[in-house]
Image (spheres, rainbow, N blue to C red):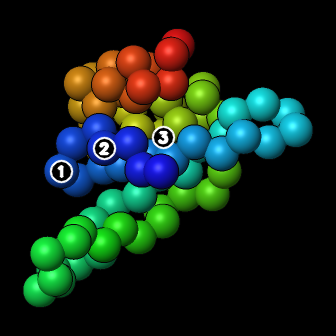
Amino acid sequence: MLEHINGEVSVSRVKGKDGELWICYEPLGSNESKRQLWKRVTGLLTDAEMDVYLGDRYRSLALSEKFRHISGR
């Protein structure tokens, strides 16, 4: 299930044998359907790796803080 950080970024949690991993998604261009489509922009990342990725990619402290809240960090 996607967890929406904001209108431009969502993440999903994947439970693996080594713990929880995360995948980041962005909107898939413009679409005419009522449902927003999302494209995967990362592979599986740990909590720490996703935190760094969001900070580097989007340069937003608010995104990183929202991810920490979602991930329970």
- Seen in the picture, residue 61 relative to 60 is either above or below; the reply is above
User: On the picture, is 45 further left or further right than 42?
Assistant: right
- Residue 4 shows which numbered tag? 2
Residue depth check, mark 3 versus mark 1: number of the one nearer the observer: 1
Which element carries disc 2, helix, strand or loop?
Answer: strand
Q: Residues within 10 Å of mark 1 (few under 14, many from 20)?
A: few
- In percent of the image, x 85 and y 34: which residue is there? 18
The Cα–Cα distance between marks 2 and 3, rounded to whole angstroms, is 16 Å
- The quadrant holding residue 16 is top right
The residue mark sitting in front, 2 or 3, is 2
Mark 3 sits on what residue? 53
Please indicate, yes or no, whether residue 48 appears anywhere in the rendered image. yes
Q: Is residue 9 left or right of residue 35?
A: right
Residue located beneath label 1 in the image: 7
Distance of label 3 from label 1 (alpha carbons):
17 Å
Check disc 3 and report its element: helix, strand or loop.
helix
The amino acid sitting under disc 1 is: Gly
Check disc 2: other Cα within 10 Å, few if <14, some if 14-19, many if 20+: some
Mark 2–mark 1 CB contact (< 8 Å): yes
Give the image quarter of residue 29. Answer: bottom left
| Percent x, y of residue 60 | 25, 31
Looking at marks 3 and 1 on the same chain, the residue that comes earlier in the sequence is marked by 1
Q: Is residue 57 visible?
A: no
* Type of amino acid at the residue the image marks with label 3: Tyr
Residue at the spot 16% in from the left edge and 83% down from the top edge: 33
Q: CA distance from mark 2 to mark 1?
A: 7 Å
Sequence order check, earlier mark of 2 and 3: 2
Q: Nearer the viewer, residue 11 or 43?
A: 11
